[in-house]
Image (cartoon, rainbow, N blue to C red):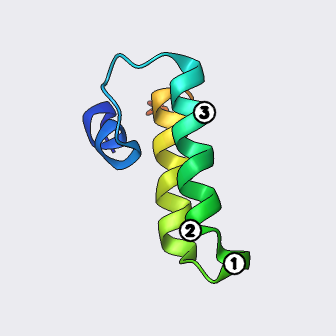
Amino acid sequence: MTKREAALILGLRESAAIEKVKEAHRRIMIANHPDSGGSSFLATKVNEAKDMMLGKGKRRTNIF
């Protein structure tokens, strides 16, 4: 997932502030949480998008 895709999932700009990212994540997760009948796939993608926007995305490391 790229930062652009993450921003689209959260409904934000790529340069959004940390607080805006957290607010958007919370808003989407409240509406779509798996415990409330939402999709676990969607929740996973929203969490992945939040991590990417906060700079905690999957790091590609070279083992060599």
Look at mark 2 in the image and give the residue it sits on.
Answer: 32
Q: In the drawing, what numbered circle is on residue 22?
A: 3
Q: Position of residue 25 (x, y in %)?
A: 56, 44
Quick one: SS at disc 1? Answer: helix
Badge 1 local density, few (<14 within 10 Å), some, or many (20+)?
Answer: few
Q: Position of residue 38 (x, y in %)?
A: 57, 77
In the displayed structure image, the side of residue 12 where residue 51 appears, left or right: right
Q: Quadrant of residue 32?
A: bottom right
Residue drawn at the location 52% of the way across and 26% of the way down: 20
Q: Is residue 61 visible?
A: no
Residue drawn at the location 53% of the way across and 77% of the way down: 39
Q: Nearer the viewer, residue 24 or 61?
A: 24
Residue drawn at the location 35% of the way across and 49% of the way down: 9
Q: Which quadrant of the rendered structure holds the C terminus?
A: top left
Residue drawn at the location 26% of the way across and 34% of the way down: 4
Quick one: SS at disc 2? Answer: helix
Q: Is residue 37 visible?
A: yes
Work out which residue is located at the far right of the displayed protein and give it: 35
Q: In the drawing, what numbered circle is on residue 3?
A: none
- Mark 1 vs 3: CB contact within 8 A: no
Look at mark 1 in the image and give the residue it sits on.
Answer: 36
Q: Position of residue 3 (x, y in %)?
A: 33, 32
- Mark 2 vs 1: CB contact within 8 A: yes
Q: CA distance from mark 1 to mark 3?
A: 20 Å
Residue flagged by tag 2: what amino acid is it? Asn
Residue flagged by tag 1: what amino acid is it? Ser
